[in-house]
Amino acid sequence: MFDQILCIDDDPIALMLCKKVITKAAFSNEIITAQNGEEALLYFNTLKYNTKPNDLDNKKPRLILLDLNMPVMGGWEFLDHFSTSNYTDFNTTNIIILSSTIDPEDLEKAKKYPMILDFLSKPITQQMLEYIKNKMTI
């Protein structure tokens, strides 16, 4: 079980479903949500600047479930920012893209980001969580 994961999606129904499936599967103790990439970056900035360096490892999410198509700041923009040196404190956080898109160009683009563990289609299921858990070898 993970201590904390972050779900980034602009669809409140997708976030609710994500929370339900994760809770039912006992996959994480805490589920943080953000409605777009900008909100998620604000969350990471708050962690970075308001957490003692020794405590940061215990407070940061181990996994991010990321949607791609969102207003304000989409998933690709989030990844571009999250990949910079400003966020190196979080470079052990794995990312699963969870999107309704099945565009082959998106699948190829995802390979350029080393923190992306996989690209899965919505909606999240308990089987997908089991797959992720095995892939991350908790």
Image (cartoon, rainbow, N blue to C red):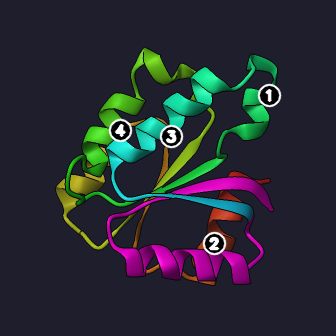
Question: Relative to 113, does residue 120 appear above or below in the rendering?
Answer: below
- Helix, strand or loop for disc 1: helix
Residue at figure coordinates x 39%, y 75% from the top left: 12
Kind of residue sitting beneath label 3: Tyr
38 or 95, which is in the foreground?
A: 38
Determine the CA span between mark 2 and mark 4.
Answer: 22 Å
To which residue does mark 4 refer?
79
Kind of residue sitting beneath label 1: Asp
Q: Earlier in the sequence, mark 1 or mark 4?
A: 1
Q: Earlier in the sequence, mark 2 or mark 4?
A: 4
Determine the CA span between mark 2 and mark 1.
Answer: 27 Å
Does 40 lie within the magenta span?
A: no
Residue 128 position within the rendered picture, expressed as x and y whole percent measured from the top left: 58, 75
User: In the figure, is residue 15 to the left or right of 37?
Assistant: right
Determine the CA span between mark 3 and mark 4.
Answer: 14 Å
- Helix, strand or loop for disc 3: helix
Q: Nearer the viewer, mark 2 or mark 4?
A: 4
Residue at figure coordinates x 50%, y 79% from the top left: 16
Q: Earlier in the sequence, mark 3 or mark 1?
A: 3
| The disc label shown at residue 43, or none | 3
Q: Earlier in the sequence, mark 2 or mark 1?
A: 1
Q: Nearer the viewer, mark 1 or mark 4?
A: 1
Q: Residue furthest front?
A: 50
To which residue does mark 1 refer?
55
Q: Earlier in the sequence, mark 3 or mark 4?
A: 3
| The disc label shown at residue 35, or none | none
Which residues fall within the magenta stretch? Answer: 1-28
- Helix, strand or loop for disc 2: helix
To which residue does mark 2 refer?
129
